[in-house]
Image: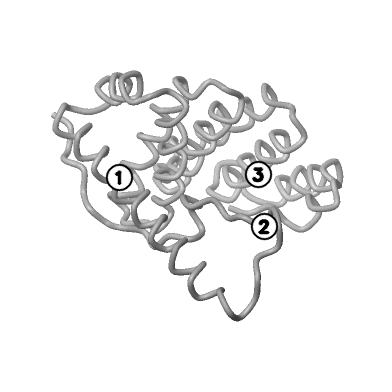
Amino acid sequence: MGLPPLDTWGAWRREEQLCHETLTWVPERSTQAAAFLHLLGIIAQARGAYDEALEWYRRSLALAEELGDRAGMASTYSQIGVLFTTRGTPDAAVAWNVRSLRIRMELRSPEIRIDLYWLTQQRQMLGETRFLGLLHEQLSAYGAQALLRLLDDFASRAQDEAVEAAAEGQGTQAAEPGDRTSAASPEALSAPQPDLPPET
């Protein structure tokens, strides 16, 4: 779920106010309410109120779980992983992004690229040994290896697409200094749809 334009102006308080107001209009126990609780977490995270953001995410997640909203659960699991990663605790984030990825793969959601991106970041931050150890806490040995292959494919595809984009851009326009897109940005990739083996 993307942020409305108000956040680009730093109008977080107004955006937050609108979310609270909207929560009074939607059924209290609905996927819409869960989505607006999630959005309140994103707003809090954007302004650096990380503990508050985590509380909003937990409330959203509890409601999504109660309603059986798997897409909503995946979105919130993923965002909690993002929060931990950006706060410098990627070891706490891995389990959240793995949970999200598994659901999104079951749903065949193109948003799996978001979790692949953040798991790739966590892998780089933690190093291969620590990252693999954390995967083994979440997945079987086979599942962990399948996920590593998926991450490698994701990174390779991102690099290939970055090279293609650079080649297409040559001769038509020069890149601005400092105008560099991350080779593994989630927006640049199509979502592969392989399946991780189910856990037993």
Residue under pointer 2:
179
N-terminal of the pair, mark 3 or mark 1, is 3
Q: Report the label total.
A: 3
The amino acid type of the residue labelled 3 equals Leu
The amino acid type of the residue labelled 2 equals Asp
Q: Name the spot of residue 172 as percent of width and height, x first.
A: 61, 80
- Say what secondary structure mark 3 lies in: helix
Q: Residue furthest front?
A: 171
Residue at image point 61% right, 25% down? 87
- Say what secondary structure mark 1 lies in: helix
Left or right of 66 in this view: 43:
right
Left or right of 48 in this view: 130:
left
The amino acid type of the residue labelled 1 equals Asp
Q: CA distance from mark 2 to mark 3?
A: 29 Å
Q: Nearer the viewer, residue 87 or 155?
A: 155
Residue under pointer 1:
152
N-terminal of the pair, mark 1 or mark 2, is 1
| Residue 171 higher or lower than 152, as above or below | below
Q: Nearer the viewer, residue 188 or 139?
A: 188
Q: Nearer the viewer, residue 32 or 197?
A: 197
| Residue 91 higher or lower than 120, as above or below | above
Q: Nearer the viewer, residue 128 or 95?
A: 128
Left or right of 94 in this view: 13:
right
Q: CA distance from mark 1 to mark 2?
A: 25 Å
Residue at image point 39% right, 39% down? 100
